[in-house]
Image (cartoon, coloured by chain):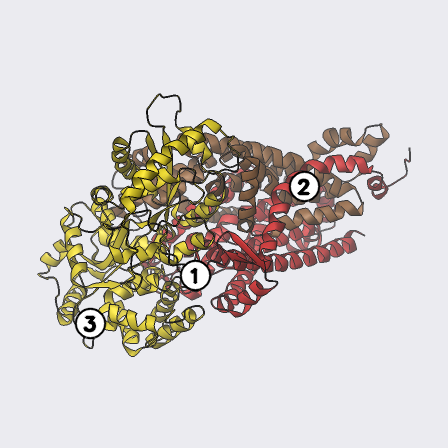
Amino acid sequence: MKKLNKNMWAWLTHDEHQQPKAITKGDKLRKRLSALGAIGVAALVLTGCAPSSPEPAETSTQAQSSATADPVDPVTLTIWSWRTEDVEKYNTIFDVYEAANPGVTVEFEAFLNTEYNQILATGLEGSDGPDLAMVRAYGGVQALIEAGQLLPVDGLVDTSAVEQSLLAAATGKADGKLYGVPFATQVLQVFYNKGIFDELGLTEPTTWDEFVAVNDALNASDYTPMALGAKDAWMLPIFHEIVGAARFGGPEFRAELLAGTKDFTDADYVASIGLVNDMTKYMVDDVIGIDYASSQVQFISGTAAQFPGGSFELGNFQTQAPDMDLGVYLVPPPPGAVSSKPLAAGWADGSFAINSQSENQEAALNLLNWLASPEFGQLFVNEIKQFSAIKGMDYSDPVMKEIGELFAAGPSQYINLVDMRYGTPTGSTLIGEGIQSMFLGEKSAADVAQYLQEGVSEWFTPGS
Amino acid sequence: MRVKTAGRALSVRMPILTGVVFVAPALILFAVFILYPLITALSYSFFSWKGTLRGEFIGLENYVTIFTKKPFDEDLPNAFAHNLLLFAGAMVFQNSIGLMLAVVLHKIGKLKRLFQTMFTMPYLISPLVVGYLWSLLLSPLFGPVNAILKQIGLEEFALPWLGDPTTAIWAIVFITAWQWIGFPMLLYGAALGGIPDEVTEAAEIDGAWGIKKFRTITLPLLLPALGTVSILTFIGAMEAFAIPYAVGGSDGTPAGATDVMALLFYRTAFESGDVGSIGTSSALATVLFLFIFGVAVALRFLLARGEKRLYG
Amino acid sequence: MRKRFDLLALPKHVLLWLYALVSLSPLFVMLLNSFRTTKEMAMEPLALPEEFRFTSYEKAWVTASFETYFINSMFVTITSVFLGTAVSLLAAYVFARSKRKIFGVLEGVFLSGLLLPVFLAILPIFYLFDTLGLISNLWGLILIYAALSIPFSSFILAAFFRQLPVDLEEAARIDGAGHFRTFFFILLPLVRPAIATVVVFRFVPIWNDFFYPLMLMRDRAVYTLPVGLTRFFGEYQTDWATLFAGLTIATIPLVILFLVASKQLVSGLTAGMSK
């Protein structure tokens, strides 16, 4: 259901302004810390506090059997997450870590996505919080940082293997410190059903005219050209990025927007919103009544030929429609486009961070360093089947490989999530609701842009 | 022993100690697990917040925010109007149909329990399940409702029910009524059962039948139940959350057409990236609480006066 | 003697059956769809299953591991409904029969608990639970549900107590019975319909609630059924066949429970009607 996918609101993209903090002493420190960690944990196990003790993470430490005569004192690290669907896969990944680090047990606990923010905020405050946690990216993590619930890890974690532009996703807006390690990225593009394209003699469009021709041909057939869940407002800014990024100019526009030389009422941005409205003729009537899950079913069941969406759809499509031959492409630049090449908007999908109250901070830092390593990145790619935040991973899945190439050729950012989530109302909410009003005939493209600009002006000051 | 004293005198005679002993268990539970957290939460609205970290006392600043700043200045009146509409809709449809069913079921004979069970069945289902179910039933693409409408030639009524702002809120009124109809029906039914047979029989002997009997005998005697149902409906409508959430998501799609106060609170408290959200969401809840409280107390006062006039 | 020919019997029955159709057909659609494939549903919104297959049920049951959750839910719901109703009964009796101002004020305070959006207090409740060691403890849930029942239950029960004629109590008092004996032996049997109402209307929301266990129970061993379900829903949102099977499985226990108990519940509710 739609709300169970709300983590999309929190997904963030690269921020090239925030340069990564280079870490050089990381390795030395790591070794020193692990020794310290062993002593600290031993002391902890000996004190043996009651579960209701105010000290955090006590219970999880003791959950590990302390009777073993192991040379390394056992430690259990708890990790919280919103990925309930990936628990088994993460257990497999952490088995590898446990095997390489005797005495360390990693417990991966997942909670319902929609309530996760509140569960984590209270959990980090309480006495049985996790040692590490998945945190939302960018705006979504600021409340935890401001409350002092996360451990700043500058100089403690070697992030050299991480895609540097993604580190901003785990950076405090106010203090500029790094609070975690990003774990995944997402990319936006159009998925299409190659079987339907072949049947109608269509090929991947490379120019705007071809794109229109393909959709007109699909419109004339029995198939619905595009599946879109317009009833779920969060899907609409995603669709806007897919169709309009090249029109408004992606990274260049973003730079001017953040510098304050342009705002959302810019003519090119308005035109990009207008493109979204033009696309409705390629969707079912009453697309405003179609929810996200229904749009997925349209594509999976083969009634719709294309699905404009994020790379996070891939796993679900491949499980639900294993026989479908899946293709991906980027919408070519329309006439008047600012960018001459098609753009793929991407963003970081959350980070791993350490509870500032964790009693196992040394062990947690060791683990966090591993989470920033290529070894974890490749395991993540192989098991979770999403894009890792670690550079230079090997993608065996042909569709993933192709998405990776599309992104490399035309990288862009999902502005309304990356930069417009630091206050209320958020950019993504505003443009989502605005486009719904546009579909209903209540707002023009210019009205939507105006609505977006006025809304974010409540808290967003360019150049800050 | 004062044999002559009537009911009122009897109640006065209850020793205070007995009263305290009887009330104590409920009071302790209520005070510890509702009252204390609640007052604490209300107090949050007067402070500035950084995540879960409480800052300084800022007086009414959070209240100024929710009445003057975006998105609240638009969302608040919009959501509030929908709550009132849900209340009106529930009173007009849900409660009158519930009353009608209760009256028809009264003395229907053997099948009564079967009908009561069937009508109450939707109430048993988790609101989340209800949301999934009706979203799908009303889907323009895969929904049986529109499929039936098209089959019987009512093509023009096969609307995108949950996608059109004009129909979406009424769909929520309908789904709520569908789920909750058993509630007024059973309460009215119990009240009808409480009317002594002698009263109705006496009326029948006097020639009061059908509508006349209902209006002159049944309705006045149902008044206390009517009051109870109205107050609970009001509270239910003002706090509506589960069904709007399950049907329209936390944004109240499409374009805020199904937004209600509880959703606005939920969005602010749980989904907003704003670091000060505990303060603003607490202010929202306080405003909502004060409004419901005021109206409910006024309603109760009026009803108590009405009852007094009826029964002396 | 009381049986009379009712002219309206036929239209009455037609009306009742029509409404029964409105009430139950969505549930039948849910049941039927659980036997269909997602593709069948996408192609033809309303149709009978091509064949009755239980694969979806197997998948749903195996994935969701309902067993533990079911036992937890049973324990929490029954205990908290019992506790909540018991304390509310005692309080409601005082509210209805004492004219002391203090109890009037208290009744108002209880009632105010009915008026507050429940989410509001979650943060203070969390800290309270943390201090009391009630996080991930089923008794914590029981206490909070019992407390949450008090406003509604005492409101309904007090209303019923007020409607009871005082003559019976008067008579009991003349016979020398104290307040306790009068309450337990004279009044309790009389308010049975109200107790049934309160039990039904508290049992269901507590059984279905997922918010408090989600927020306060952080160990899989103490999850309740709705928490298990919310995870399940997220995972199968586009696998409609499995989803409908899960929805059906989630609904069946309560329906069975209600059917089994309905004899007591509804006959309690209608005790006054069918005499």
- Asked whether disc 1 touches disc 2, contact meaning CB atoms under 8 Å apart, the reply is no
Q: CA distance from mark 1 to mark 3?
A: 39 Å
- Determine the colour of chain B: red
| Left or right side of A409 for C184 | right
Amino acid type at image mark 1: Ala
Which residue is at the front of the view, B229 or A278? A278
- Pinpoint residue A313: horizontal percent, then vertical percent: 25, 52
Q: Residues within 10 Å of mark 1 (few under 14, many from 20)?
A: many
Residue drawn at x 80%, y 35% is B17
Both labels 1 and 3 in a single chain: no
Q: Residues within 10 Å of mark 2 (few under 14, many from 20)?
A: many
- Chain identifier of the yellow chain: A
Give the residue pinned by disc 3: A339
Amino acid type at image mark 3: Ser
Quadrant including the N terminus of chain B: top right
Q: Is residue A203 above or below residue A462?
A: above
Q: Look at discs 2 and 3 and give the one toward the viewer.
A: 3
Which residue is at the front of the view, A446 or B156? A446
Give the residue pinned by disc 1: B168
Which image quarter: residue A419?
bottom left
Q: CA distance from mark 1 to mark 2?
A: 36 Å
Give the residue pinned by disc 2: C157
- Determine the colour of chain C: brown
- Pinpoint residue C76: horizontal percent, then vertical percent: 52, 33
Residue drawn at x 42%, y 36% is C252
